[in-house]
Amino acid sequence: MRLLLDSSLILLFATAATLSAEEWELRGRVIDEAGKPVTGAGIDFFWRANGTQKRPDGSPLDLTKEEDLRTVWGHEGRMEPYEGTIVSSDGTFILRGASRRHAVMAMDAARHRGGIVAVPKGQEREPITIRLAPLVKIRGRFEIDSSGKQPDFTVVRVMVPEDPARPLDNFWIAQCGSLDARFEISLPPGRYVLELLGAPGVGDVADHTITPYPEIVVTGAASEQDLGLFRLAKPPPTLRHEQMAKADADGSWGDYTKHYGQQLPNWHVTDAHGLKKEAQLKDFRGKWLLVYFWGLSCPHCLGTDLPKLAKFYEEHRARRDKFEIISFCTEADQQLRSITDLDQALIPIVEHVWNGKPLSLPTLLDPSFTTMKRYGLRAYGTLLLIDPAGNLVEGDEQTLLKHLAQ
């Protein structure tokens, strides 16, 4: 679901994204072309093409030192699993991974052969077999627009093709960073999507990219495949980032925690479901109110928080005279102009994540980010609790539950 990928401005970290606390266990075996077990192969859901992030003695590198920083982002082409495991002597493995990663790559110890398997939905408990084939080293280089200038720092993230049955999955399989505007990554033959990013420096926000993400086919016809020169361009700012930058400059965005004990300003709404579009906070006086802010580019919101709140809502329906829960969707650049647009965008989520059941919570839509700015909300996944007097208080649904029990 490419809408879930916010490619406009992405913070570049020295490591892969932190794994979710929700994990699963994958079992299987690794074999060679002849079907024989491969001993000592590495296997992981995500690989670095810059070697390890540790010194030979196992101690971590100091990213505040230029020498260590260059080590972390040097060695382009040296494939190492981010965490992963090593295949046992009989070719079998047990691998734990984040709940939204289901594509796994294995490489032999020499990094000459590799293979990728995407685990189909519903077959997570079935053992898999990864058959290795000769790897192909893909390489390329960067410049900014057609200026001939190189970005100070670049990152290439390789994604396997999306699985429509897993609209919230993370499909990255490998990454190569560079301080020299180039990349080298070894991959098995197959189809891939490249996310290409350039930034002023390590840890800075990526301000140049290519959209849409280019697709490549690694044929295996040769051991190396030169993809040539990629020209990165600065994408137009999204409404969200444009507003946040302006508000940060004049100090008008604020911090929602400063409203504790106070009444919040009116929200801004363009459409609604389960409520009148004209409804405001004052209309819920006398009840406890939970308001959850989310967007389509927040997998955790869609996969975890909203289902949890919907379950709470249904389990305590007998007490709804005492409380209300509102899901508040806000999305960049006014891509969603109506609840009908939102329902259309949520079709794959309803089908594959919410077990065919549309969201039961009343929903408000604000594609302008006006409400987030008024309240001082900087991130999706923020839950606000408002007491019966209309004041913002600290807490969540568990806090609400305690008040309902009184």
Image (cartoon, rainbow, N blue to C red):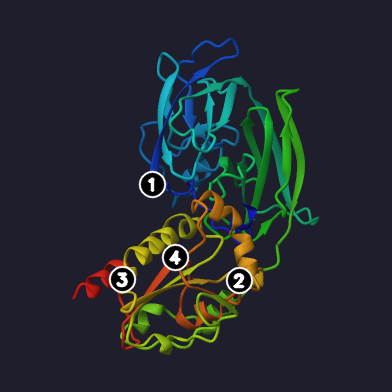
Q: Quadrant of residue 85?
A: top left
- Element class at badge 3: helix
Comparing labels 1 and 2, the label whose residue is closer to the camera: 2
Say whether disc 2 or disc 3 marks the residue closer to the N-terminus: 3
Identity of the residue drawn at 54% across and 35% down: 120
Dot 3 alpha-carbon crowd within 10 angstroms: few under 14, some 14 to 19, many 20 or more: few
Amino acid under label 3?
Ala
Q: Gap between marks 1 and 3, in whole Å? A: 31 Å
Q: Are marks 1 and 2 in contact (CB under 8 Å)?
A: no
Q: Is residue 238 visible?
A: no
Q: Which residue does the numbered mark 2 point to in the structure image? A: 339
Q: Nearer the viewer, residue 141 or 383?
A: 383
Q: Report if the CB atoms under discs 4 and 1 are less than 8 Å apart.
A: no
Location of residue 16 in the rendering, given as x and y in whole percent from the top left corner: 49, 46
Q: Which mark is residue 318?
A: 3
For the residues marked 4 and 2, what is the alpha-carbon distance in whole angstroms? 20 Å
Q: Residues within 10 Å of mark 2 (few under 14, many from 20)?
A: some
Q: Quick one: label 4 or label 2, which is nearer the N terminus?
A: 2
**Mark nearer the N terminus (4 vs 1):** 1
Viewer-side label of 4, 2? 2
Q: N-terminal of the two: label 1 or label 3? A: 1
Q: Which residue is mark 4?
A: 381
**Residue found at the far left of this picture:** 406
Residue at which label 1 appears? 22
What is the x, y in percent for residue 36? Answer: 52, 10
Q: Amino acid at mark 1?
A: Glu
Q: Secondary structure at mark 2?
A: helix
Q: Amino acid at mark 2?
A: Ile
CB atoms of marks 4 and 2 within 8 Å: no
